[in-house]
Amino acid sequence: MENNHPVWNELDDALERIDIENLVMRHLESCHYKLNGYWTEYEFYEEIALIGPVRASVVSMSIGETKMKHSSHRNYWIRLQFALKHDISVSEAHHTDDNCDIGELVLILAPNLKIIDENWFIDVESPFVVVKRGNKKISS
């Protein structure tokens, strides 16, 4: 489909009507800037806390559909990917923007904008993250 097809303009208009920054900040606040049960490649963390203030900026937005097997029913969803950074604009920390990375958050939304899935990619070595390690490990 061409980039100038009307469906892309309609999608742009629909996504502009969503207050995306408010949506992600409400989600971060609702989980108290914490994750429970996070796995890296080899290690389990019982809890990860993001040290505020946190800034979330949109990296990518997409829509998709899942067609149900043996049915004409389709499920539609919106995928929003955010970069999470320590917000130095409200912090007294003396860091450059280059070392304020915390990680990424991907939210999958239903058409009614309810969050149906989330995926976190956290830099557990970030100075803006406090980790509580678990006792589970994957042997290499």
Image: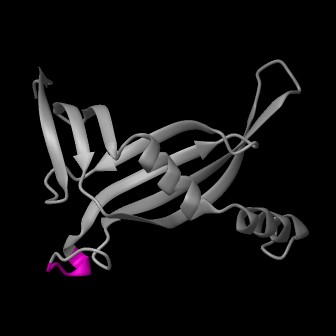
**Residue at the top extreme?**
70
Q: Nearer the viewer, residue 46 or 75?
A: 46
Horizontally, is 113 left or right of 93 in the view? right
- Which residue is depicted at the point 13% across and 54% down? 125
Q: Is residue 27 left or right of residue 83?
A: right
Q: Quadrant of residue 87?
A: bottom left
In the image, residue 116 lies at what x, y percent? 60, 34
- The region drawn magenta spans 94-98
Q: Quadrant of the N terminus?
A: bottom right
Q: Position of residue 39 (x, y in %)?
A: 25, 33
Q: How many marks?
A: 0
Is residue 96 covered in magenta?
Answer: yes
Q: Quadrant of residue 136?
A: top left
77 left or right, relative to 38: right
- Please give the name of the residue rendered at 69% of the width and 45% of the height, measured from the top-left corner: 113
Residue 25 in percent (x, y) is at 48, 56
Relative placement, left or right, of 28 versus 24 is: left
Dividing the picture into quarters, in which one does residue 92 lie? bottom left
State whether residue 40 appears in this view: no
Question: Residue 29: horizontal and vertical position, in percent?
Answer: 43, 48
Query: What residue sits 32% from the left and 65% below the top?
Result: 85
> Of helix, strand and loop, which mostly describes the magenta segment?
loop
Is 12 part of what is drawn in magenta? no
Residue shown at the point (55%, 63%) measured from the top left: 21
Q: Is residue 40 above or below residue 107?
A: above
Res. 134 visible in picture: yes
